Image: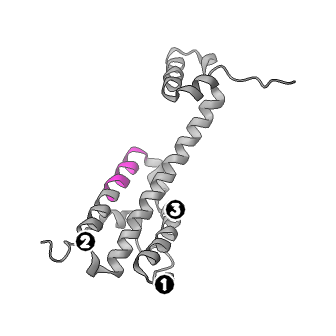
Amino acid sequence: MSETKQSPGRALYERDEHEWIAAQISALESGQFNRLDRGNLIEFLSEITTRDRRELRSRLTVLLLHLLKARFQPERLSASWMSTILVQQNEIRSLIEEIPSLGRRADTIAVQAYRDAIRLAARETGLPTSRFDPTTPWTVMEALAFDPPEPAGER
């Protein structure tokens, strides 16, 4: 029966991620690189970048969905839609400011998000997907600059 050698930090990594992170920080700060859980550290850092890209794509999808709904059904624009647009704009701006390299990839990520937004917009508006532009009509910066009008009757 062969046993696979488990890194010393693996058990901690699996038991308590925050304590494991603190141990990795301590090892780095003290220069004790032999205490680093290299395998899990590489995996963890890779997952963080994937998570951040996924979050940006998700937020762009929601923003683009609501921009499409506002464009194609302006009569249905509500305070809820406006709030969603503003919240997503704020969160996307924060992500881009905190992670500049993610901001440099935002327009590429928006292409994927727009495809998702079209599918959702078609479902929510009842319009066929062919009614929507095949490519996003907004750059990320344009989508972030969009200032939704006040909904009718709520002025």
Q: Amino acid at mark 2?
A: Ser
Q: Disc 3 on helix, strand or loop?
A: helix
Principal secondary structure, stretch drawn in magenta: helix
Q: Amino acid at mark 1?
A: Pro
Instruction: Tell me the tag on residue 78.
Output: 2
- Left or right: 97 in relation to 35: left
Tell me which residue sits at (46%, 71%) in the image. Answer: 120
Tell me which residue sits at (25%, 67%) in the image. Answer: 147
- Left or right: 139 in relation to 41: left
Residue range (magenta): 89-99
* Residue closer to the observer: 150 or 120: 120
Q: Which residue is mark 1?
A: 128
Tell me which residue sits at (41%, 63%) in the image. Answer: 62
Q: Quadrant of residue 87?
A: bottom left
Q: Quadrant of the C terminus?
A: bottom left
Q: Which residue is mark 3?
A: 108
Q: Amino acid at mark 3?
A: Thr
Image position, residue 105 (x, y; %):
50, 56
* Residue closer to the observer: 124 or 43: 124
Question: Looking at the picture, does residue 35 appear above or below residue 88?
Answer: above
Real-space CA distance between mark 3 and mark 2, rounded to the nearest whole angstrom = 29 Å
Mark 3 crowd level (few <14, some 14–19, many ≥20, 10 Å Cα): few
